[in-house]
Image (cartoon, coloured by chain):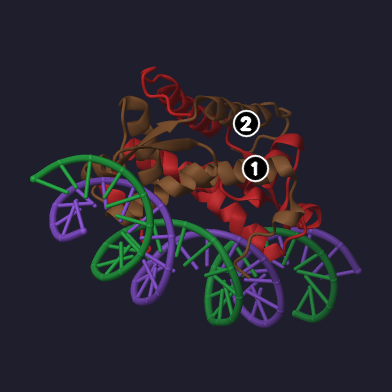
Chain colours: A brown, B red, C green, D purple
Amino acid sequence: MGVTKTALFDMEQNELAVLAKALAHPARIAILQHLAATTSCINGTLVQELGLAQATISQHLRELKELGLICGSIEGTTVNYCLDSKRWEEVRLQFQNFFAQLADHPDDNLCC
Amino acid sequence: MGVTKTALFDMEQNELAVLAKALAHPARIAILQHLAATTSCINGTLVQELGLAQATISQHLRELKELGLICGSIEGTTVNYCLDSKRWEEVRLQFQNFFAQLADHPDDNLCC
DNA sequence: TTAATTTATCGTAATATTACGATTGATATG
DNA sequence: CATATCAATCGTAATATTACGATAAATTAA
């Protein structure tokens, strides 16, 4: 046990869960916000900024990279990361769509 | 280790991460969608619907309940769950605000 | 009251996540 | 080339999550 039973759910549900998991850590939220706010974002800067170890930041960056949410280009000895705007637009729409589903419910189910 | 260093991050970041974590499992996504789609949603129905054990569904329901995302009212031997619309509007805005932050970035940081 | 039904909780096993020191690999600089 | 710098990866410890059987608690029905 301890393993999510992915096969029980449809692709939309699994994809949204995976995306939500990427946002389910404050360090990754902070990294993404930092990427949006600055013109260059390198691992070393984030280590200073966030107060986590270099290996930990690198691990978080990889998770975001694996989902295509960010990408990095090597510039000398450093790596410059940035958001993938196109990908984020997709992600935004997936969440928006989900929230719309939740908002559009029959009025007769109200218990709070 | 293995414990998230909450103290390093601000409230907005921590709150969003906690909310994202609630959505970071396809069963909880499915439960929420089911709650939105039907007029009554009880644990037993979900067990049939999702194919997870009763104890597992109950555990997921509790997580959603603890964040105030859903609430349940006892009706005889069953419990009827529903979405907390007001709370979901807050949540939707928190995500919307976050996505807006990400979209509003300087054009000169493009590497993908 | 007794039995049946439904949900919550407990206990626990399997797996995943988080964090970091140490090391490696790659690139720049002396 | 030797050294310094930076990021990725490895290995591993601590903790969290997921899942479920068993049990408990609450309510209804007989």
**Eyeballing the image, is B77 above or below A97?**
below
Residue drawn at the location 67% of the way across and 58% of the way down? B57
Q: Please provide percent x and percent y for residue B55.
A: 66, 65
Mark 2 falls on what kind of element? helix
Return the residue at label 2: A94
Instruction: State whether residue A53 is above or below residue C30.
Output: below
| Tag 1 secondary structure | helix
Q: Nearer the viewer, residue B56 or B72?
A: B56
The picture places residue A90, in percent across and down from the top left corner, at: 60, 28
Counting from the top left corner in percent of width and height, residue B82 is at: 65, 40
- Chain where mark 1 sits: A
Task: Measure how far apart labels 1 and 2 are at the Cα level.
Answer: 9 Å
Residue A4 x, y percent position in the rendering? 64, 59
Give the quarter of the image for residue C5.
Answer: bottom right
Amino acid type, callout 1: Glu
Relative to B42, is B92 above or below? Answer: above
Which chain is disc 2 placed on? Answer: A
Q: Is residue B66 left or right of residue D3?
A: right
Q: Are marks 1 and 2 in contact (CB under 8 Å)?
A: yes
**In the depicted view, which residue is nearer to us: A18 or D9?**
D9
- Residue lying at 65% horizontally and 49% vertically, measured from the top left: B26
Q: Residues within 10 Å of mark 2 (few under 14, many from 20)?
A: some
The residue indicated by pointer 1 is A15
* Amino acid tagged 2: Gln
A100 relative to C28, above or below? above
Q: Is residue B85 visible?
A: yes
Give the quarter of the image for residue D30: bottom right
Screen quadrant of the N terminus of chain A = bottom right
Give whichever of discs 1 and 2 has the lower sequence position.
Answer: 1
Question: Nearest the camera: A13 or C28?
Answer: C28
Residues beneath discs 1 and 2 located on the same chain:
yes
